[in-house]
Image (cartoon, coloured by chain):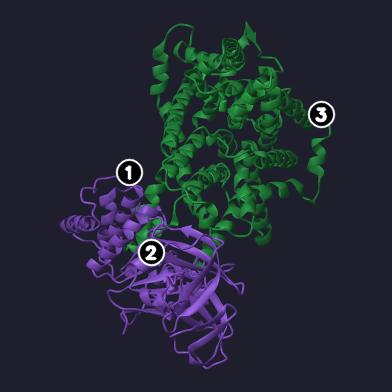
Chain colours: A green, B purple
């Protein structure tokens, strides 16, 4: 390309690329200070707990039965959650891939909403449905005049397992279902014509072809459940602790920072390894399988068997995914004296009888302010990073792309923990800064902005920009008049994404937020931890509000998203 | 009794054309072609015979036995799919061996019969190939070998050449018929291409809008299409509405023609087909008895390679297409022309008002 340009244009191009380095330098600096530096501090803290090089104490920690027990529990609960989710969602994936039926779009949206709900909201929703004060137990005790609630799922293994299925159902439907829809039905029919029964055809043909998609979705679910925090903390109670929960307890409750650091290292290593395998599988699964247009292969359920399958799945989705969300809203309006908006009103009243409680309204305000700050910072950083990454790929961009995604594959708790041990001393003493929460949220949110922007930026044909340049536009004018109008929508998507992430963020916030400035998820967590009907009701009301906002944000994103999302 | 009997099949779809009482017979070792435009129900009929779809009513009898309760995998019918549906995660050998594995054959039998099937389609040495590495023609042969290997009682081929380019298609048409005849396979195949149907089939069933219009061997179909729909689908253009009169004379708006067909009672509505090869230039020789003389202006002259196609506008305002040999060369467009139509080039069909 260079050869066709004269000397002066060459100079301009060199200048842009030098400026480009400058632009991408800002997000890189941000990552260095707020991501790599805290991680480094975690490493230092685990290997040099007392300020001296002491691997012995780490190995003692790692060798302890407590450590092994935590790791073992984390692993097997993640495995159990993964298997249960696959079993629950594979029929759904099939139905979505192969049938068209009235209400399909709506049902698909319902399956997708849980995935974006904040963990505290999900925990509250399950409390509202199946907890001791939940709808099911209340109704059953009333109807049958029971003395105690019949379902005692609270603080049991099954409770958070169910919540994990709720959360991750859509992953299987999206990844496996999407893949399934591209498999020709003729392959299955060919097997049947060659003498394979329906089951043999599934086992010998469909399943092997689906395997990469199943493995990819299973791995993703495993990663999410492995670093599950809020769900286990709230629904599991003190009896259960994943590594994440244990990092939090060790750091915040017991103040055993070296132990928390040692646990963080395991968490980091595991999630990175799993993420690496996941992206590797994802790259490999893009094998050409004769993609067929979807409408051809979706058929209406005709036979009784078809109708039972489709109907059964619809009922299952509504029960598993719809019921908790509905129960949350219902419960937020249910008081002992019947239907009332008292819990919502109390959110906006200044009750000062509690010493350590901040009025709920302040939590709402904090969340909105933090959210806006996150939106601005994440959008700016994301735009700078994406503008650079969208250039024709060089070795540097192919290196930087995954680098910017790293915060996503690091657990929120680890990030929050890193923040409090790294940013509490000069030159970076942000311990008391109000900016700490938005900074943490920006770290989590800005990869989403990058991922929203990149496809749009890359979709702009180069000829368009070249045409503008030949017509006399300076690089800045090209960006303003060509790129920006096209990218505007994608930036909006990224910004809303950042806002939604910030509003619901719990794992990092629980570390970095000061007691006086809680966010909505923190307030919900505190309400749920307090006795009394009012606290419970306020948790329900605030969760309902948060659910409404995040679900609305998500539905907006689904409408606005250009093409296929990259995550 | 025919090997395969299709009786009064009715199938209705929401929105799509279905099947409205289709009946067909197929003798052992015979190749039947279902020919028709897309959406005429031919593939649906094939899938009902295969058991992949259920008919609303009607029966499929094989060897005298009603097949409606037999699931597809127990029918021992073979099927070759439109896009071949080769299993992408298996190599050529495993694709061809799949049916034999389902029959729980021994390893030696599987190896031998898979090799035989591959040899039959001329793909010796391809066993270890990945199906992704095959060309279109090779994929088609693997699909054929795979459907033949378990020795099905009936083979169905759904547009077996639809995915191939024209040159390849013409070569493979001949191959498919030779292979099917060599193993004496009773077959049904579906196509919308009349050239393919003529090249491969023993019997052709022309379908249109869910009904069978005509069942006949290729030559007979070409010579005596049963009605205007069939004639039009076979690519004939010169279809004239007319009235029959005495002595096999048909009066049309383009003139009166003498046919050899047994004429229905005089005064009946009829459609007269003038085949493109029915005309010749007189070249000084007088018309033979029975010939009809057409006069008009030559409007188009298209060189087709083997012959010319000419468009004739008669003095009565009809526009007719004919094919004339390269020698003697037809006159220039715009010139007057006189053509002799021989009665063997005419077919009389029932009129629209049946």
**Place of residue B130 in the rendered image (x, y in percent of width and height, measured from the top left):** 30, 45
> Looking at the picture, does residue A67 appear above or below residue B25?
above
Quadrant holding the N terminus of chain B = bottom left
- Residue B196 is tagged as 2
Q: Chain of mark 1?
A: B
- Residue A352 is tagged as 3
Cβ atoms at labels 2 and 1 below 8 Å apart: no
Residue at x 27% of width, y 66% of height? B180
Q: Distance from label 3 to label 1 (Cα)?
A: 75 Å
**Place of residue B296 in the rendered image (x, y in percent of width and height, measured from the top left):** 56, 70
Q: Chain of mark 3?
A: A
Q: Distance from label 3 to label 2 (Cα)?
A: 88 Å
Locate residue A347 relative to residue A450 in the image: left or right: right
Q: Which is more toward the observer, B305 or A246?
A: B305
Q: Secondary structure at mark 1?
A: helix
Quadrant holding the C terminus of chain B = bottom right
Q: Do marks 3 and 2 share a subunit?
A: no
Residue at x 39% of width, y 13% of height? A56
- Residue B43 is tagged as none
Tell me the mark number nearer the camera, choosing from 3 and 1: 1
Residue at x 76% of width, y 31% of height? A364
Q: Distance from label 2 to label 1 (Cα)?
A: 27 Å
**Place of residue B306 in the rendered image (x, y in percent of width and height, measured from the top left):** 38, 60
């Amino acid at each position: 390309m260079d050869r066709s340009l004269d000397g002066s244009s060459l100079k301009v191009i060199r200048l842009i690329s030098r400026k480009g380095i400058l632009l991408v330098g800002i997000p890189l600096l941000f990552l260095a200070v707020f991501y790599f530096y805290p991680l480094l501090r975690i490493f230092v803290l685990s290997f040099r707990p007392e300020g001296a090089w002491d691997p012995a104490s780490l190995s003692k920690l790692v060798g302890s039965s407590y450590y092994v027990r935590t790791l073992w529990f984390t692993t097997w609960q993640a495995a159990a959650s993964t298997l249960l989710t696959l079993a629950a969602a594979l029929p759904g994936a099939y139905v979505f891939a192969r049938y068209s039926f009235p209400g399909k779009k709506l049902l698909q949206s319902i399956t997708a909403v849980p995935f974006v709900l904040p963990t505290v909201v999900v925990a509250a929703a399950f409390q509202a449905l199946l907890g001791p004060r939940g709808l099911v137990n209340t109704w059953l005790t009333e109807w049958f005049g029971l003395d105690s609630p019949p379902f005692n799922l609270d603080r049991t293994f099954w409770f958070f397992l169910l919540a994990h299925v709720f959360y991750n159902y859509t992953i299987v439907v999206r990844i496996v279902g999407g893949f399934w829809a591209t498999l020709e039905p003729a392959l299955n029919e060919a097997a049947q014509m060659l003498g394979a029964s329906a089951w043999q055809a599934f086992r010998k043909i469909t399943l092997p072809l689906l395997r990469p998609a199943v493995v990819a979705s299973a791995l993703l679910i495993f990663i999410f459940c492995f670093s599950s925090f809020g769900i286990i903390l709230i629904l599991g109670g003190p009896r259960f602790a994943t590594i994440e929960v244990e990092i939090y307890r060790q750091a915040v409750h017991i103040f055993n920072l070296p132990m928390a650091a040692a646990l963080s290292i395991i968490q980091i290593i595991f999630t990175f390894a799993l993420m690496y395998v996941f992206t590797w599988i994802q790259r490999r699964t893009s094998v050409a399988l004769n993609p067929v247009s979807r409408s051809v292969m979706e058929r209406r359920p005709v036979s009784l068997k078809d109708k039972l399958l489709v109907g059964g799945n619809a009922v299952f989705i509504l029960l598993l995914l719809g019921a908790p969300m509905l129960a949350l809203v219902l419960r937020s309006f249910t008081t002992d004296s019947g239907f009332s908006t008292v819990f919502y009103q109390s959110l906006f009243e200044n009750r000062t009888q509690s010493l350590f409680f901040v009025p709920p309204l302040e939590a709402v305000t904090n969340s909105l302010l933090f959210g806006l700050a996150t939106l601005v910072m994440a959008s700016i950083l994301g735009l700078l990073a994406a503008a650079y990454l969208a250039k024709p790929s060089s070795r540097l961009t192919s290196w930087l792309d995954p680098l910017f995604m790293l915060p996503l594959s690091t657990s929120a708790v680890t990030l929050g923990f890193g923040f409090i041990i790294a940013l509490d001393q000069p030159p970076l003493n942000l311990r008391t800064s109000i900016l700490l929460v938005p900074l943490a949220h920006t770290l989590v949110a800005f990869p989403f902005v990058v991922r929203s922007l990149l496809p749009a930026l890359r979709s702009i044909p180069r000829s368009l920009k070249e045409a503008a340049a030949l017509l006399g536009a300076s690089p800045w004018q090209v960006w303003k008049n060509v790129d920006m109008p096209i990218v505007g929508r994608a930036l909006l998507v990224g910004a809303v994404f950042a806002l939604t992430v910030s509003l619901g963020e719990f794992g990092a916030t629980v570390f970095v937020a000061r007691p006086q400035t809680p966010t909505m998820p923190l307030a919900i967590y505190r309400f749920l931890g307090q006795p009394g009907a009012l606290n419970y009701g306020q948790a329900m009301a605030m969760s309902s509000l948060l659910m409404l906002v995040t679900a609305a944000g998500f539905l907006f994103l689904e409408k606005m998203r250009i093409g296929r999302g990259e995550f | 009794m025919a090997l395969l009997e299709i009786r009064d099949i009715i199938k209705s779809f929401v929105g799509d054309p279905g099947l409205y009482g289709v009946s067909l017979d197929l003798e052992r070792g015979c190749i039947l072609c279902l020919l028709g435009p897309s959406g005429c129900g031919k593939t649906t009929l094939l899938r009902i015979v295969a058991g992949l779809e259920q008919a609303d009513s009607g029966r499929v009898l094989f060897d005298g036995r009603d097949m409606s309760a037999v699931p597809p995998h127990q029918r021992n019918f073979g099927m070759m799919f439109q896009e071949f549906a080769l299993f992408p995660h298996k190599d050529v050998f495993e694709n061809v061996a799949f049916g034999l594995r389902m029959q729980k054959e021994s390893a030696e039998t599987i190896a031998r019969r898979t090799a035989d099937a591959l040899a039959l389609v001329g793909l010796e040495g391809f066993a270890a190939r990945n199906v992704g590495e095959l060309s279109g023609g090779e994929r088609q042969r693997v699909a054929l070998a795979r459907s033949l290997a378990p020795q099905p009682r009936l083979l169905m081929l759904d547009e077996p050449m639809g995915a191939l380019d024209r040159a390849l298609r013409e070569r493979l048409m001949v191959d498919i018929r030779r292979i099917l005849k060599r193993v004496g396979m009773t077959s049904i195949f579906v196509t919308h291409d009349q050239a393919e149907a003529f090249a491969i089939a023993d019997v052709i069933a022309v379908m249109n809008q869910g009904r069978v219009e005509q069942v006949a061997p290729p030559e007979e179909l070409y010579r005596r299409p049963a009605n205007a729909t069939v004639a039009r689908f076979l690519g004939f253009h010169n279809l004239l509405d007319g009235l029959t009169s005495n002595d096999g004379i048909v009066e049309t708006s383009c003139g009166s023609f003498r046919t050899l067909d047994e004429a229905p009672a005089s005064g009946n509505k009829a459609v007269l087909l003038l085949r493109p090869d029915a005309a010749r230039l007189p070249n000084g020789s007088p018309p033979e008895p029975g010939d009809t003389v057409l006069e008009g202006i030559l409007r188009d002259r298209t060189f087709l390679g083997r012959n010319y196609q000419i468009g004739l506008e008669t003095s009565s305002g009809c526009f007719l297409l004919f094919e004339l040999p390269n020698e003697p060369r037809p006159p220039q467009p715009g010139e007057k022309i006189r053509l002799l139509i021989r009665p063997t080039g005419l077919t009389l069909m029932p009129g629209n008002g049946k």
